[in-house]
Image: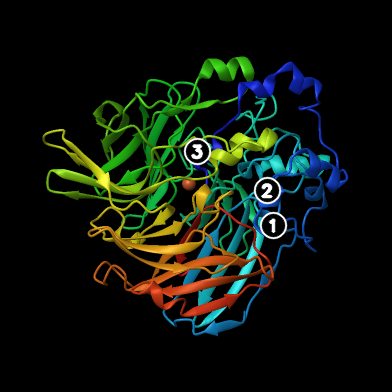
Amino acid sequence: MELSNLGAVVGELSHLSPERESAGYHKRMHPMNPAERLRDYPVTTTCIGGVAEFEHTQPWIYGLDNPYLHGVYAPTTQELSESGLRVEGELPRDLLGTYFRNGPNPIHQPENRYHPFDGDGMVHAVSFCEGDAAYRNRYIETIALREERRAGRSMSNGVMGPFDFNTSPFGIKDTSNTDLFYYAGGLMTLWYNAGHPYRLNPQTLETEGYFELQGRSHRRLSAHSKVDWATGELLFFDYGDEPPYMTYGLANSAGELVHEVEIDLPGPRLPHDIGFTPNYTILHDLPFFHDPNVLARHRMRVLTFHRDIPTRFGLIPRYGAGDDVRWFECEPCYILHVSNCWEAGDWVVMDGCRSINPMPSAAGGEGELSHMLAYMRLEANNYRWRFNLRTGEVREGDIDDLNTEFNKTNPLYAGVKSRYAYHQRIPLLEEGGHTLRFTGLVKYDNDTGSCQQWDYGEGVYGSEAVYAPRAGATRDNAEDDGYVITLVTDTRDWTSQSLVFDARDITRGPVARVFLPQRVPFGFHASWAPGI
Ligand SMILES: [Fe+2]
């Protein structure tokens, strides 16, 4: 998630007050009596599942009163590989491939306030083959994690700062815990903040090192760079605090750089995603960003949502030059995830989830975590933008107002007209959504705005769902003639399952439940790799 708003940032300058300093705010925290700590910052009382005692977790979590370290968010310490998993229902014989999911799984006690983007990345994989299912999970062995393993402790601050550019080129720890997808024979894992992508063996999940693009001199790459299944190309972007504030490029299906250009932006930005059609890539310039002078002075990124600055979407020909970008101004908003884009005559259409309140007010009473908890409460809804390439006109509007995000579509239809999107239902604060949680699957018909819903059930929380085409399917198959796969954790008995739905009708519930051999903590993004 990140959810840039989720991740990006964060903090109030008041956190830097002398009172905070003298109170030991920047001191390393040591394991302590949990009861004593909970008295200071009683926010875990609203944590999903409470502060459960787990057999396989990091013991230091019980000394920290941060809901994103407990209950459904508590890290696991087990790395497992098991096949022949128990299945309830029947796994389709034409479901062939792997559901991969990334997410935070912190190993060492943080130096400072913990944010979910700081947790060491861990990949969980559920593979499906001829009616059988197998599970594997492994840490992403990043450079930062290897250094911390050697030292036996956390070595750098996290998203909530303060930033220290002596310890990392990013000032904070690149955990590679946010996004992932299969590309050029490897599994690429990415961090929300345009870190260095890692390459994992898709069968063993062994970390093989940085995912280098041949011919590219710098490694930085943003989460939600994406593969066009029609061509095998990687369309990528990155962003940073120094000019060029954004670059955009392509690599071919063999992992070789074929195109890269600088994008002129008015300052540092925190875009989170891109969209693409066969001929255009849609870049995001969103009015939710930090002041670089504040970063330089206080070593923190303090995000502001500028309600008076339009959102801009830049349409660049797939192999276009930097000055070929054509910008379209829209209502101010933040956007995390694009569902799909396509061309329709003079128009380019983009469906996605829009937020007009990316920095909700803190609920209060949550101590030093108030702001992090507030902006992790994701407020967004299904939305459509249309850009007229001939006249420059923009049309935009809600598809629906239900609070949803982590939207995915059939990847075979990426870049061409699609109708269906699969979202996660996210309760608002007033609906019990104190922390980010996925309570159900929503299948949208974006042509009509109607939807099907499947609630995971009381105390059961989901992961991002992916669309898995039937083995051998093409665009000649109906768009929803396939499967939707997610991963859920039941906080009543702390078991986890992978659920397989018939995409045509999710209201029937899963056609198969795969029982996983361990509790899987909450995570961020997932993807489907066919035949892997
Ligand atoms: Fe994301």
CA separation in Å, label 1 and label 2: 8 Å
At x 80% / y 50%, what residue is drawn? 62
Task: Judge: label 2 CB < 8 Å from ligand 1.
Answer: no
The crowding category of the residue bearing disc 1, from other C-alpha atoms within 10 Å (few below 14, some 14 to 19, many at least 20), is many
2 or 3: tag closer to the N-terminus: 3
* Residue at image point 30% right, 41% down: 281
Residue 478: horizontal and vertical position, in percent? 26, 71
Image marks 1 and 3: residues in contact by CB distance under 8 Å: no
Does residue 126 sit above or below 372 in this rendering?
A: below
Q: Which residue is mark 3?
A: 4
Instruction: Please say if the residues under marks 1 and 2 sit with CB atoms less than 8 Å apart.
Output: yes
Q: CA distance from mark 2 to mark 3?
A: 19 Å
Choose between 317 and 505: the one closer to the eye: 505
Q: Secondary structure at mark 3?
A: helix
Disc 1 residue type?
Gly
Residue holding disc 1? 71
Whole-angstrom CA distance, mark 1 to mark 3, is: 24 Å
What residue would you read off at disc 2? Answer: 67
- Residue 263 at x, y percent in the picture: 35, 27
Local crowd size for mark 3, using a 10 Å CA cut-off: few (<14), some (14–19), many (≥20): many
Secondary structure beneath dot 1 equals helix
